[in-house]
Amino acid sequence: MTTRRNFLKLSALTASLFTANKSKAMESISEISPPPPIKPIVLSTWHFGIQANQEAWRILSNNGRALDAVEAGVKVPEGDPKERSVGLGGRPDRDGRVTLDACIMDENTNIGSVACLEHIVHPISVARAVMEKTPHVMLVAEGALEFVLSQRFKKEKLLTPDSEAEWKEWLKTSEYKPKANIENHDTIGMIALDMNGNLSGACTTSGMAFKMRGRVGDSPIIGAGLYVDNEVGAATATGHGEEVIRIAGCHSVVELMRQGLSPETACKKAVERILLSAKRRNKALADIQVGFIAINKKGEHGAFCLQKGFNYAVYSSKINNQLFDSKSLL
């Protein structure tokens, strides 16, 4: 029979064991605390992302701001006349005019964008000027050019001899059939996390080759071609812009990460939505390509695309500027 004295002794022993076990449990929890974020880190689309990342890393590795890094990074392919889908050297529209689109977004949801811009090699810098020097978030066509010339940007001819020759050859048939991973290989998007834990992104393109005059894709549209939420992560897109716009692609990726999905899984879910949308409209899939890249606040990264052929570059303290092939649905 348990006496009152024995009961008190047993209660005291149980309490001491509970306290000891609780202390050990707390020690175990502290021992498995999450690893620190991977930062800085920068991601960009396609093979030209390697050189773009190098320029961005020069800023990030010196404790620079992510916004400065992404602008400087994408300016590399913008200024390369050999790159046929961005900036100088970009393929023209069906009228032989090179028109450029770009957008930029920082950690404070400041945004700037330009579309159908002619004669300016670096539309990403124009987008930043719109963000920082106007009360607006987007300027287009002649209005954008008028603004940028007032900011003393240099007016230049963008149609290179190679692009002009390709356009004249296209005029012989005037057949508009974009090919996946070729004409769809049309954008450099870049997203970065800096040492201060802040995210920014940039996206710039000359758009689809031989597009209709005035056509604008996803690249200059915040929420479609690019989105940044400094509490969650960032994403950017490449490929068939019309398909990305239909689902507000990059905003969708970031919101999926907010729900707890990894960057890769969030990108995959967005691509699945695009595939479903295309099937509903009986859209032929053979010539459609869409790819997303994303990072979260932990510095974790991922990508996914509709069909094989999309690649992206990653530069961080753990990855020395490598090119990765994205996983695909098809």
Image: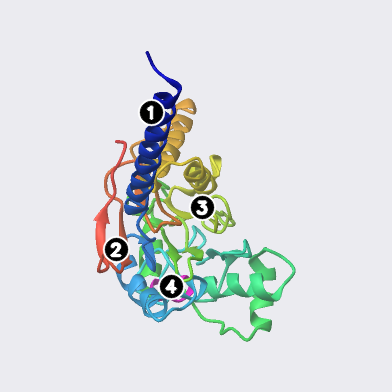
Rendered position, 107 above or below 236: below
Region rendered in magenta:
70-78
Q: Which residue is mark 3?
A: 232
- Label 3: how many Cα within 10 Å (few below 14, some 14–19, many 20+): some
State the mark number for residue 111: none
Distance Cα–Cα, label 2 vs label 4: 14 Å
Tell me where residue 190 sits by quadrant: bottom left
Q: Position of residue 39 (x, y in %)?
A: 38, 66
Q: Position of residue 278 (x, y in %)?
A: 45, 32
Residue type, numbered disc 4? Glu
Q: In this rendering, does residue 48 appear at all?
A: no
Q: Which residue is mark 2?
A: 47
Q: Judging from the image, what secondary structure is the residue with disc 2 in?
A: loop
Q: Judging from the image, what secondary structure is the residue with disc 1 in?
A: helix
Residue type, numbered disc 2? His
Distance Cα–Cα, label 2 vs label 3: 27 Å
Q: Is residue 285 left or right of residue 318?
A: right
In magenta segment, residue 76? yes
State the mark number for residue 78: 4
Q: Disc 1 vs disc 3: Cβ atoms closer than 8 Å? A: no
Q: In this rendering, does residue 173 appear at all?
A: yes
Tell which tag, 1 or 4, sits nearer the viewer: 1
Tell which tag, 4 or 3, sits nearer the viewer: 3
Q: Judging from the image, what secondary structure is the residue with disc 3 in?
A: loop
Distance Cα–Cα, label 1 vs label 4: 77 Å
Closer-to-camera residue (90/63): 63
Principal secondary structure, stretch drawn in magenta: helix
Tell which tag, 1 or 3, sits nearer the viewer: 1
Q: Disc 2 vs disc 1: Cβ atoms closer than 8 Å? A: no
Q: Which residue is mark 1?
A: 10
Distance Cα–Cα, label 4 vs label 3: 29 Å
